[in-house]
Amino acid sequence: MAGHTSTRTGSTGRSGARAKTALVLMAVSLLLVSGCGKNEEEGALEKTVNVKVWTVGKKPVRPFIETIGSLTASEEVSVSSEVDGVLREVPVDEGTPVSRGMALARVDSTDYRLGADNAEAALKQAEAALANIRAEFGRKEALFREELLTRQQFDDVTLRKTVAERDLDRARVVLSLAREKLGKTSVLSPLQGMVKEKRVSAGDFVRAGMPLMTIVRVDPLKLSFTIAEKDVSQLRAGQDVTFSVDPYPGREFSGRVSLVYPSLDERTRSLRAEALVPNGAFELKPGFFARVKIFTGESREAVVVPATSILYEGTRVRVFLREGSAARERSVKLGAKYGELVEVLEGLKGGENLIVVGQNNLVGGVKVHAVQ
């Protein structure tokens, strides 16, 4: 019995030793796993991310509406002849600059000059006839007062004087019309601009009212554009406008709102407006496509940042800053957008190093390195 009891005790001891060994191994494994996790986290935080930074500061900004538009001539006139005849001269061509009152074409004036000469001769004859009648009237009036002339004789000379006066008035009118027609043989430009279209040549026979050419006024030009219904309350005549056109990359041209149409286009829910644009050098041409900014307020200082640096997460808006060698997250409140910049109303005050490239995959505390 004593020997049997000793055997069981030894077996139990060996089992306990194995259990203790298993517990020790498990503890060591847990410590190793825990240590690896911490090392991985520390490794992630120790990783350095290359970024680009932008120094936050206040800049002058001016609220504006962006749209597109096109340039058109401020005036367009179809020029016609006012008399019939053969064109003897057409001294302009398409694209020719013209000034107000400049001769665009000349109709053969021979017949009209003869008509004016004849009317002038008729006027002189009427003046002479009236002078003779008035002299006769003076003599017979004196005789009539002395009762040496009958009433019928006096009435006859009075009537002839009246007829002669009317003949003189008629001759003056005829001469005036003849001279006016003679003057209209020269077709004059009604405005300063350029010849857009020429429809006739020297030698053509034209009739009164027949269109000869089209003149356009290109200084100033008219910039036509539309704005969305939501922006209508911000638009008014007199506002400054800037715009760019493809033929002159990198350049900006300016103008001023001159007309706001009274009603919206029901189909597009947009409002038409126009601005006058100086064009003294004739660089701008009717038909150019324009990218337009209409300034709706005065310039002011504001904190602005590149729109690409902003991160959106639901209703939350945030940015990353470089503080020392680490990235720090900060929530911001945005205001108006100004092209590629956006105003920050709350969260930044200026002087901070804003991360503008590489911020999409950052977390707070990650080490960053600013590159050029």
Image (cartoon, rainbow, N blue to C red):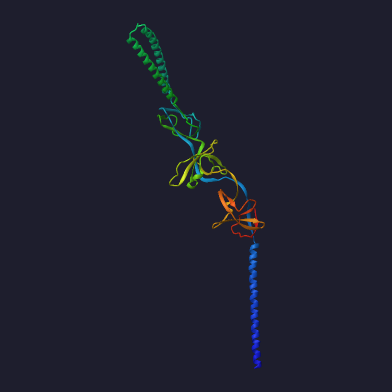
> Can you say whether 58 is above or below 329 in the image?
above
Residue under the point 63% across and 66% down? 40
**Quadrant position of the N terminus in the picture:** bottom right
Residue 109, by quadrant, is top left
> Can you say whether 56 is above or below 6 in the image?
above
* Residue 197 seen by the camera: no
Farthest residue, direction right: 324
Front one among 321 and 86: 321
Q: How many marks?
A: 0
Residue 230 on image: x %, y %: 49, 47
Residue under the point 65% across and 72% down? 31
Residue 82, by quadrant, is top left
Residue 64 on image: x %, y %: 54, 45
Residue 213, by quadrant, is top left
> Can you say whether 187 is above or below 63 in the image?
above
Front one among 204 and 95: 95
Residue under the point 36% across and 13% down? 158
* Residue 64 seen by the camera: yes
Front one among 192 and 167: 167
Residue 346 on image: x %, y %: 59, 52
Q: Is residue 95 left or right of residue 152?
A: right
Residue 353 on image: x %, y %: 64, 53
